[in-house]
Image (cartoon, grey):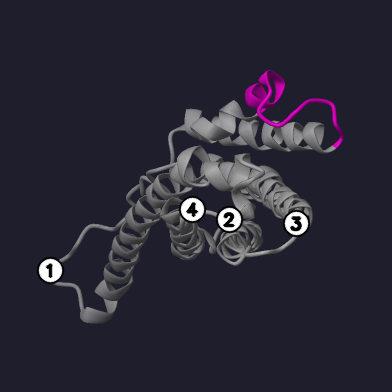
Amino acid sequence: MTTIAMSAPAVDNFHPNATTSERRPTDGAAERHKDSQRLGRLTGLFFLITYATSIPPVLTLYVPALSDPAFILGGPFNAGVTWGAVLELLLIAANIASALTLYPVLRRRFPVLSLGFVAARVMESAFIAIGIISVLALVTLRATAGDADPAALAVVGQALVAIHDWTFKMGPGVVVGVGNGLILGYMMWKTRLLPRFLSILGLIGGPGLLLGSCGVMFGHFDFGSSAHSLSVAPEFFW
């Protein structure tokens, strides 16, 4: 979800002879509408930032650390992995910012669900932060490997990679399915702040992402397999 359209509220006609007190409700409604528009644009911007910062670490920057078992055994400093961590820190900031800017727009109509969306974004960000720590721990151990036992380092490296993998499966997997998919999709459907077909993608993609994550957790199929990719596709486009 990248943009949010704010529909104009019903505003009474302006009467030049009306008193200041009579005009205040209309003026207040117009000001609230402008604030909602600004917050909507900011929310769309923050969602764009989440996309821009979440993809490079997974596809390129983290690959040397997560795919090579010998990475932890030592070698030159890998700036790409560190830049991946920086991008994910920006992702955390954009995640939480997108929830905070959207909350004032939706809290009047959905006081519980809008707060639930904020909580989901914070929880997702917590999983991402744990993943960042595990990757940076790999970088630190690689730099200080020295004369450490290679077999022991390899076991520690596998554990850190496994932690990162599961934070990715639980955060962007399970939590996003509930927060971005079901909660946000439902609120967008009811308010029509987004075109209906996009809201439907969220309402379908949320359960699909949850089913895909559960399938991976219980060993029915592998992460990234055809079945898993099919189940998460609607959420990706949402």
Residue found at x 54% / y 43%: 64
Q: Is residue 94 above or below residue 24?
A: above
Q: Secondary structure at mark 3?
A: helix
Q: Is residue 79 above or below residue 190?
A: below
Mark-to-mark CA distance, 4 and 1: 63 Å
Q: Can you give x and y, in whole percent of width and height, for residue 187 in the image?
A: 57, 47
Q: Mark 3 or mark 4, which is nearer to you? A: 3
Disc sitting over residue 16 in the figure: 1
Residue at the limit of the structure toward the right, as seen here: 218
Q: Secondary structure at mark 1?
A: loop
User: Which residue carries the number 4 mark?
Assistant: 81
Name the amino acid type tagged 2: Gly
Residue 1: horizontal and vertical position, in percent? 46, 41
Give the labeled residue for mark 3: 156
CA neighbours of label 4 inside 10 A, class few (<14), some (14 to 19), many (20+):
many
Q: Relative to residue 203, is residue 163 depicted above or below? A: below
Query: Marks 3 and 4: CB-CB under 8 Å?
Result: no
Q: Is residue 117 visible?
A: no
**Mark linked to residue 74:** 2
Tell me the mark number nearer the camera, choosing from 3 and 1.
Answer: 3
Q: Name the N-terminal-most of marks 3 and 4.
A: 4
Assess whether mark 2 and mark 1 are in contact (beta carbons under 8 angstroms).
no
Give me the residue at 57% from left, 41% from top: 185
Which of the two discs, 4 and 1, sits closer to the camera? Answer: 4
Q: Amino acid at mark 3?
A: Val
Categorize mark 2 by other alpha carbons within 10 Å: few (<14), some (14-19), many (20+): many
Compare marks 4 and 1 and give the one earlier in the sequence: 1
Could you give the CA–CA distance between mark 3 and mark 2, rounded to whole angstroms?
13 Å
